[in-house]
Each structure stands twice: as structure tokens, then as C-alpha cells.
Image (cartoon, rainbow, N blue to C red):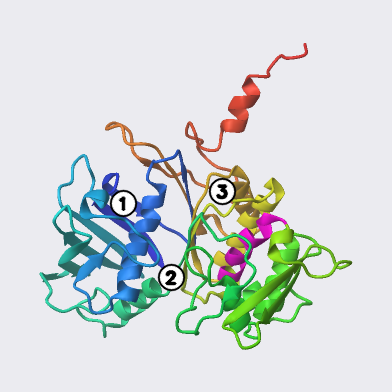
Amino acid sequence: MITQIDLHFFKCFELLKLPLANLTLLSGSNASGKSSILQAFVILHQTIREHEWSIRLVLNGHALKMGTVADVVDKVHGRHAFEIGLTADEQSYRWAFSGERSEMSLAVDRVEIGGVVTQSPSKLQHLFPDPNNAGTSDLALRLRNLTYLTAERIGPREFYPLEDRQIATVVGPEGEHAVCLLHLGRDEHVQEELVIEGVPPTRLRQVEARMKIFFPGCGLAVEQVPRVNAVTLGLRTSEDTDFHRPLHVGFGLTQVLPIVVAGLSASKGDILLIENPEVHLHPAGQALMGQFLADVARAGVQVIVETHSDHILNGIRRAVKGLRLEPHQIALHFFRPRNGKDAQAISPQLDKSGNIDVWPDGFFDQFDKDMNHFAGWGD
């Protein structure tokens, strides 16, 4: 598991050392740096995946388009370089990158693994100088295979492209491969810890069972179009009705489906990054989503989620209180815009009852603030 990420001169951070857990929740005001944490992972991921032998960090790829060096270097203290560090399985890894501000990639100036430094490497594989090292190989594989789901997930479609298994390995940043992945792996077994009893342990049936928790009566039908590299998705919201085209059911179903498929397709040790899983979900569904993500984390998948939803948070708290996760398996981080005086990230702690020790101003407290305006009304 990756237990810490360090950022130096990256985006809005002069220096950040952020602990990570089985399930990490990133919250805070807009433009406070939450997304930057996920982006640091993703630019490593897409360089490793799309440019296996590159000695440069690529800022623009299929998963993420970040612009130029000037767009990603800290504008207050940085110039033309930044560093990303990871701690995984008690081993430290650090990369130093630099480039001209108008360029769209950066040279790898230095790779440091467990104190061993490689300066100006002339050859790298998956951004590592020694890919045959066991720990290095494991981390490279986890970064290569991570799943990143943005907040802008695709909506209902008449049909979905059917890709080769080597392409549709994960659901894709917009969930564009979710239906394809569901079809290709429909008969594969999900992790035992995630199996809902009384339902066949296959991916299609377990995804359908999970969707029924969010949307009672939900049914799924995935069929390949004859002689076409495409599949269709049929949805229903009641067992008394036939299957409908996705356009004719609630928008939330197609927004939740990629998250459920991603969670149930992942293996132990995989990394799952999700932006705003609450999109288009009723508050009760948002709380259920927090509990689902806790279940995925309990099964050995490392989950990092960015959210503005107190219902997601409360679903996670309920999972802790219900003994589905231990408090030390949860990391909560609240980000504030940089002001030069206060820490940018505050990390409230959970206890075994799901209680939170500190509530910084702005940390999921808007409901209480709004209610203060109604105090005494009607007296």
C-alpha cells in the first residue's frame, strides 16, 4: 500500500507530505489542491502506461491533459521543476523533474529509491532505473494499472464501444470502458470479500446486485451488437418493467455504474482514484456510496476519493462504526487555500464510533451554519 505522497513545488504546494490509508478522503474548498493529489498519481500513471521507456514525464495523455510545465509548477515559489515522492511498503521513492516552462513534458533529473540516487538517467522503464527490483516492479505495476475516474463521467449512450481486453483493462477516466469491461468480464468472479450472498459471484450479477442497493429494482442487460464492435446497455428500475435504453432512466444510474464496475473489477493492491462519486446521487445514495467505497477498501483496494459530500463522509463513518473498517484504515484530509500562515491540509481523526476529533471551519459544516440563520424563527 502507498502510505504517503510528497509534493514539492507541484501545482499549489510548496511542500506537502500527505499520509494515505486504505481509504483516503480529500475534502476542502474549491481550488484548494484536492485534485492536485490525484493528478500527481495520474501523470505518473499515464507516462508509465503510454510511454514505457520514456525518460520524460508526459503531462498530456489519454487520462489527463495538464498543459505545459508552467501550468504544473508552483506559481509562487517554483520555477521550472517539481518533485513527486511516494512511500510504499516502507520503501521511499522520489522523482525530480524539470523542463522549460513552455514544454509539455519534463526531463527526469533524478530518481531516488530507498536513498539510492540515480542522476540524469539515460534509460528508464516505467520511470524506474531498475525495473527488475521486486518492490520497484510491484509499485510500477500498481501505478500502471490504477483506475482514475473523473467527475465528468459519460452519460447515457445508445451503445458503447467494445474494445480489446488489452485496451479496456479499467473503466477509463470518464467511465467510457465500464460497460465494455462489464461485458468482457461478466463471468469472472469478484473478490470474495465483496460478494453479496445469495447472488452468483460473477461480475455482471454482483454489479447488478450492488446497483440494486443504490436503485431498488435495478436490472442490467449487456448485449453485444451482432457484427459490430459495440455493446448495448439495458436498464430497468423495477422488476415489473422491461429493460430501457439508458437515456430513459435516471441519470444517476449511468454515473454510479462505472464506480461499481471499477470497485468490483479491482484486485487486491490496486489503486482506485475517484473524483466526486456523489454526482447525480440522492443524499441517501451518497451515504451508500461512502459505505461501498469502504467495502472496496476493506477488500484490499486502495481508494482515494475527492468529495464535497458530507453524506459520503457519513457513509464512511457508519462503516467504521459498523466495524467494516478500522479507524487507522481511514485518512481524512481537509484542504484550505494557501495563505502563507496556516497549514494547507488538516487531518481530522476518526475513533471506533465514527466520531471526528476536530471540525475545522469549512469542513462539512455548512448545514450547521445555515441552520444558525433560522435559530429562533417562529418563536
- Write down the region rendered in magenta: 250-262
Residue 364 point in image, percent of width and height: 55, 38
Magenta-span inclusion, residue 180: no
Q: Which mark is nearer the camera, 3 or 1? A: 1
Q: Which amino acid does label 1 sit on?
A: Lys
* Residue marked by disc 3: 351
Q: Is residue 20 left or right of residue 219?
A: left
In contact (CB < 8 Å): disc 3 and disc 1: no
Of the two numbered discs 3 and 2 on the same chain, state the one appearing first in sequence: 2
Q: In the image as oriented, which residue stretches furthest toward the front? A: 227
In contact (CB < 8 Å): disc 3 and disc 2: no
Residue 195 in sight: no
User: Is 172 located above or below residue 252 in the figure?
Assistant: below
User: Is the N terminus in the top left, top right, bottom left or bottom right quadrant?
Assistant: bottom left
* Residue marked by disc 1: 17
Residue found 18% across the figure and 61% down from its top: 96
- Secondary structure of the magenta portion, mostly? helix
Q: Which mark is nearer the camera, 3 or 2? A: 2
